[in-house]
Amino acid sequence: MQLEIKTPSRTAPAKLVEALYQRRSVRGFTSEAVTREALSPLIDAAVQAPSAMNAQPWSFTVVSDKALLATISKNAKAHMLKELGGEAKANSFSQMLGDPNFDIFYGAAALVVISAPRDAAWAVEDCAMAAENLMLAAHATGLGTCWIGFAQKWLNTTEGLAAIGLDASQSAVAPIIVGHPKAKTDAVARKVPSVRWV
């Protein structure tokens, strides 16, 4: 169902609704680079997100170095497998994580890690809202994104934080890959939500 936006002289609201309905996670990218000029407006969109007490605690680390992305992928996979321990054989992710050719970043040109001070009361919520803004803005410009949960735990180790230039006072909340999609990702229908009107 398409929503009708009644704003005669403005197309932005209609484009926003289109992005809300059409954005989906992308897990296949071309080798084309994503320039700083293309990424900067996405970060600008991210910081327009609401935050608790308007603290705006977020910071952004952009990683586009292919060797570093490969190192993070390798270390994050090993970390996840170690955490799974004896459950790894039964876990559906274990085969994927154990594959040396599997890149957790799916060949994306860039990784944007949204972080915040570890002691910030609402860091996760604030960074998640910034991440959604970033992903919607990326979709609107034809770029694809995906939140990479596989990267989170290793990025929050001392070694992982150091790899992206952060220290132990920070928490890497949202690792978002950005790149040029190999193919259009069709919007999958959403489940009918459970709604209670009280």
Image (cartoon, helix red, strand yellow):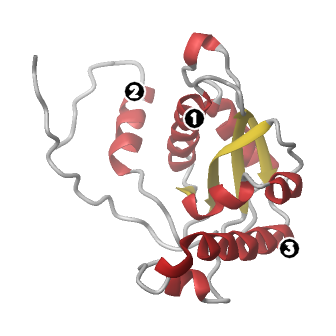
Q: Which mark is residue 13?
A: 2
Examine the image and state in which quarter residue 168 appears.
top right
Q: Which mark is residue 178?
A: none
Q: Which mark is residue 124?
A: 1
The residues bearing labels 2 and 3 have C-alpha atoms spaced at a distance of 40 Å
Q: Residue at x 33, y 18 (%)?
A: 7
Mark 2 or mark 3, earlier in chain: 2
Label 3 amino acid? Ala
Mark 3 or mark 1, earlier in chain: 3
Q: Residue at x 61, y 22 (%)?
A: 121
Q: Residue furthest top?
A: 53
Residue 62 visible (yes or no): yes
The residues bearing labels 3 and 1 have C-alpha atoms spaced at a distance of 28 Å
Left or right of 58 on screen, residue 11? left
Q: Residue at x 41, y 56 (%)?
A: 24
Q: Quadrant of the C terminus?
A: top left
The residues bearing labels 2 and 1 have C-alpha atoms spaced at a distance of 27 Å
Given contact means CB atoms under 8 Å apart, are the residues at marks 3 and 1 in contact? no
Q: Position of residue 166 (x, y in %)?
A: 86, 44
Q: Position of residue 109 (x, y in %)?
A: 72, 65
In the rendered image, the vertical position of residue 136 relative to residue 110, given as above or below: above
Left or right of 172 on screen, residue 13? left
Q: Position of residue 148 (x, y in %)?
A: 58, 59
Question: Judging from the image, what secondary structure is the residue with disc 3 in?
Answer: helix
Label 2 amino acid? Pro
Viewer-proximal residue among 132 and 87: 87
In the rendered image, the vertical position of residue 122 relative to residue 149, given as above or below: above
Mark 2 or mark 1, earlier in chain: 2
Within 10 Å of disc 3 (Cα), the crowding (few <14, some 14-19, many 20+) is: few
Question: Which residue has dot 3 on it?
Answer: 67
Label 1 amino acid? Val
